[in-house]
């Protein structure tokens, strides 16, 4: 099995041009792309719901991507390529944020679109990783770490756009995991969606159809064409 | 319609088509050339941004160390050279010099655990790493633009039109080995 995989890898290395190789494609959920299979169904749904609302209210997009490995690229170039390929954030605002984690290399990166660099300078994204994510990643608690980091960044971006009613507080490093679990449990009850969004209908970017079928227009979102110039921060854990 | 007018119309038609080809190609060359200039400006902006981060870094390092004046002088000098550099060639050279001295600093920092663990230093390291990554991205975008431009003006009929209006091949931005890799902050 492993041998086959390596052969496939070698073959793809020679056949495919650099840009086609390696970078994963957006899934139909778009906001969550769990290729490393570390996220629980519950947290996936949470992130999808939150990101969807955030986009409806503010136009900003937060996308989570987990991969098994980076196909021999460094995480910075992988993240920038993926960011541009997905087109995270609205085209003219470039207000996208990518949360990327690769298991094999044990690396994570926050990549920030041009439009959010003022709100989230590199130093801040690094500190957020240190405070909200890395402590979990070090213990291999990827599901929790991603959710917690997601909440921290959601809070920043939502506050910036004065969209505060859906913010959930992230847990800081000092707090212990037990406390966190109780908060998560309290969440399950309130996962029901509200349908007060005013963004239904005239979406200029076109959305892919999907089989989720749980919302008016299908639920498969696509990127708004947002761009990144390589801003953000990386961590090993 | 006489034979004469027919020929005139035919000639006019040919001229019109030629004008459209030349005009279209010319415009496309101009657009691609402009794109290269924009991307080149982006690289310069990012290089300056890097230089702007240095004074803060130097001050932070000074706060924790006493004997590292030599390395700090080197960094300061490299920064000045980078800001003074006029053309892209000089900028690349100065930037490489700055990279080298910063690498040396990062080795020294290992001897100062307090500095390494300080919030200020971590933040500056992130800003610096982020900017270095931005430089790498801007450089790649620039090279892509140059490639698209250079390929275009080699092809027919663009090559003739480019020659007519004096558009020449543009240079790639070749960075030295060391400056392409982005340092990682690890704990």
Image (cartoon, grey):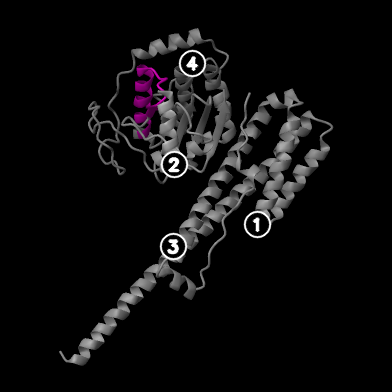
The residue wearing badge 3 is B152
Residue A74 x %, y %: 54, 35
Q: Do marks 4 and 3 share a chain?
A: no
Residue B4 x %, y %: 21, 92
For discs 1 and 3, the disc positioned in front in the rendered view? 3
The residue wearing badge 4 is A141
The residue wearing badge 1 is B89
The residue wearing badge 2 is A14
SS of the residue under disc 2: helix
Task: Return the residue nearer the eye: B177 or B118.
Answer: B177
Looking at the rendered image, the quarter that the N terminus of chain B falls into is bottom left
What residue span does the magenta drawing correspond to? A32-55
Q: Do marks 3 and 2 share a chain?
A: no
Instruction: Please tell me which residue is depicted at 48% across the width and 27% down the height of the picture.
Output: A101
Q: Main secondary structure of the magenta part?
A: helix
SS of the residue under disc 4: loop
| Residue situated furthest left in the rendering | B1
Instruction: Please tell me which residue is depicted at 44% across the width and 28% down the height of the picture.
Output: A67
SS of the residue under disc 3: helix
From the viewer's perspective, is A131 left or right of B157? right
- The chain ID associated with circle 4 is A
- Quick check: is A36 in the magenta stretch? yes
On the question of residue A144 being in view, the answer is yes
For discs 2 and 1, the disc positioned in front in the rendered view? 2
Compute the Cα span from label 1 to label 3: 24 Å
Residue A90 x %, y %: 39, 41
SS of the residue under disc 1: helix
């Amino acid at each position: 099995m492993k041998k086959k995989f390596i052969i496939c890898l070698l073959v793809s290395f020679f056949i495919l041009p650099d840009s086609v190789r390696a970078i994963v494609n957006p899934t139909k959920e778009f906001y969550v792309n769990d290729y490393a299979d570390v996220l629980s169904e519950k947290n996936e749904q949470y992130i999808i719901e939150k990101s969807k609302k955030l986009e409806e209210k503010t136009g900003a997009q937060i996308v989570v991507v987990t991969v098994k490995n980076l196909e021999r690229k460094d995480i910075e170039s992988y993240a920038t390529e993926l960011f541009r390929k997905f087109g995270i954030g609205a085209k003219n605002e470039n207000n996208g944020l990518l949360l990327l984690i690769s298991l094999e290399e044990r690396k994570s990166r926050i990549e920030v679109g041009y439009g959010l660099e003022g709100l989230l300078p590199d130093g801040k994204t690094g500190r957020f990783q240190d405070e909200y994510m890395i402590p979990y990643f070090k213990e291999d608690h990827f599901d929790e770490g991603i959710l917690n980091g997601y909440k921290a960044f959601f809070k920043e971006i939502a506050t910036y756009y004065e969209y505060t009613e859906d913010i959930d507080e992230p847990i800081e490093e000092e707090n212990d995991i037990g406390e966190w679990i109780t908060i998560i449990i309290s969440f399950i009850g309130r996962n029901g969606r509200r349908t007060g969004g005013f963004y239904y209908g005239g979406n200029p970017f076109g959305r892919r159809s999907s089989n989720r079928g749980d919302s008016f227009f299908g639920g498969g979102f696509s990127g708004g064409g947002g761009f990144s110039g390589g801003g953000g921060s990386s961590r090993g854990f | 319609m006489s034979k004469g007018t027919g020929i005139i119309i035919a000639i006019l038609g040919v001229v019109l088509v030629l004008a459209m080809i030349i005009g279209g190609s010319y415009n496309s060359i101009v657009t691609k050339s402009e794109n290269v200039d924009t991307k080149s400006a982006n690289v310069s902006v990012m290089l300056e941004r890097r230089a702007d981060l240095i004074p803060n870094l130097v001050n932070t390092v000074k706060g924790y160390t006493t004997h590292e004046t030599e390395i700090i002088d080197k960094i300061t000098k490299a920064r000045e050279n980078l800001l003074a550099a006029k053309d892209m060639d000089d900028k690349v050279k100065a930037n490489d010099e700055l990279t080298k001295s910063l690498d040396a600093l990062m080795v020294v920092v290992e001897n100062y655990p307090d500095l390494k663990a300080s919030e200020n230093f971590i933040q500056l390291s992130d800003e610096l790493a982020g900017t270095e990554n931005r430089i790498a991205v801007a450089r790649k975008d620039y090279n892509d633009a140059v490639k698209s431009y250079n390929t275009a003006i080699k092809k027919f009929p663009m090559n003739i039109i480019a020659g007519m209006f004096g558009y020449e091949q543009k240079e790639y931005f070749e960075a030295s080995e060391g400056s392409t890799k982005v340092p990682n902050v690890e704990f």
